[in-house]
Image (spheres, rainbow, N blue to C red):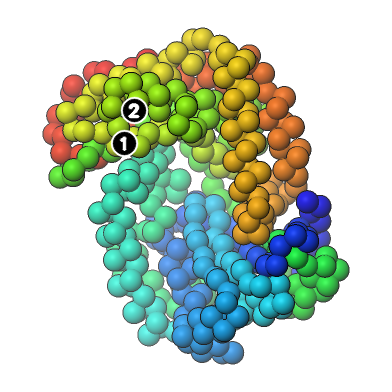
Amino acid sequence: MEQEKYILENGTRVVIVPMKSVQTVSVQVLVEAGSKYETKENNGISHFLEHMMFKGTKKRPTTKTIAEEMDNVGGEYNAFTGDEQTGYWVKVPVQHFEKALDVVSDLYLNSKLEQVEIDKERGVILQEAAMYRDTPMRDIWDRFEALLYGDQPAGWNIIGTEENIRTFNRDAFKEYIEKMYLPESTVISIAGNVDKKQALALVEKYFGVKKSDKVKQEKKSVVQSQEKPQFELHYKETEQTHLLMGVRSPDMFSKKRFALALLGVVLGGGMSSRTFLNIRERYGLTYYINSSADTATDTGYLFVSAGVEHEKLEKTIKLILKELKIVSDEKVPEKELHKAKEYFKGKTVMSLESTNSVAAFFGNQELFRKELTSSEELLEKIDAVTVDEVREIAQEIIQNKGLNLAVIGPHKSREEIAKILTF
């Protein structure tokens, strides 16, 4: 794949990745706006605004109009909000490429944000929040990050507080758009069977119209301070106890991020990984258990997540701690590291068969790193990781002072769990 980057006159960044072997095209509009950019007073506004972008424009006055226009060409569309970005995407058969740009640019630039629709959507979002709280496999992530980062944007729930959800109005959304949805904060990422020159001309037509003299708002840096293990226990009557254990790690700009990614694979990537074989297969303690590394622009952590029988919680915690300790104390054998590399490379290559995934792969790089690394270059960097580098990152991060554990289940006593939370 040959990716190209362009910058429109208004400052909007554009990434185009032609894929001649497919018959579809994906357009993603990525904006540097998420919960890490919010304040206590407007926590949740990024996510709420994402919902409102589908409630109608002057050209397409209702949600039904938008949906029918996409259904008429067999297209797909949706959006998402994270802690550092909001994204809007459309995927269509390639002959409807201009229609995709027309629709997604109209939503992004011209949403009406009618107060009556805002008031209706409050109930939808409150129900979404309730659904997440009722789903321990989802709720555990919010509780873990709140434990990790505390009372600052990185530790707040992306969906926001109930008080804020109930009080946002049209003026708040308009102000947020004017401050955050700037051309220089926006990346248009296109992947599919398109001609680069023609695609760029169409992007200029639909997205080059927005002008702004405002300066992009930078998010506040995350403050991290921890000297001993931290533990969060949320009592809930569940059929299964869910746990998420993690240690702080470098961010996405660290040169150690490739070794970190492979460390996550060794621990819990796939059904022949250490935690899967030694905790699920050997002892039958869990149904799901996995490990990976999560990195953002100024935060990162290596985690192990699992669901266990209530009475097996302490044993599972001890075994996870044991696996983390072993991988820190002992070098990963060359053969096992090779397997981890092949697993990572295989998953990467397979994921990039989808136009949506390719658009996200390159769009996110431009949004966060402002540089593009091809999949081939990425895999070369993975191949270059050594056994010593994996051990070095493991020893650096697998320490008591960076250890965190969140648990959801019908447990009342913290003391027994807290006592064993140490390497």
Q: Residues within 10 Å of mark 2 (few under 14, many from 20)?
A: some
Q: Residue at x 75, y 72 (%)?
A: 203
| Residue under numbered circle 1 | 287
Q: Is residue 177 above or below residue 416?
A: below
108 or 149, which lies in front? Answer: 108
Seen as rendered, the residue at the extreme right is 197
Above-or-below relation of 113 to 358: below
- Where disc 2 sits, the SS reads helix
Q: Is residue 322 above or below residue 304?
A: above
Residue to which mark 2 is pinned: 280
Q: Is residue 92 visible?
A: yes
What amino acid is found at the position of numbered circle 1 in the picture?
A: Tyr
Quarter of the rendering occupied by the C terminus: top left
**Nearer-the-camera pick, 89 or 299:** 89
Residue 321 appears in the figure: no
Please give the name of the residue rendered at 51% of the width and 10% of the height, measured from the top-left corner. Answer: 330
Q: Residues within 10 Å of mark 1 (few under 14, many from 20)?
A: some
| Residue 47 vs residue 71, the one in the foreground | 71
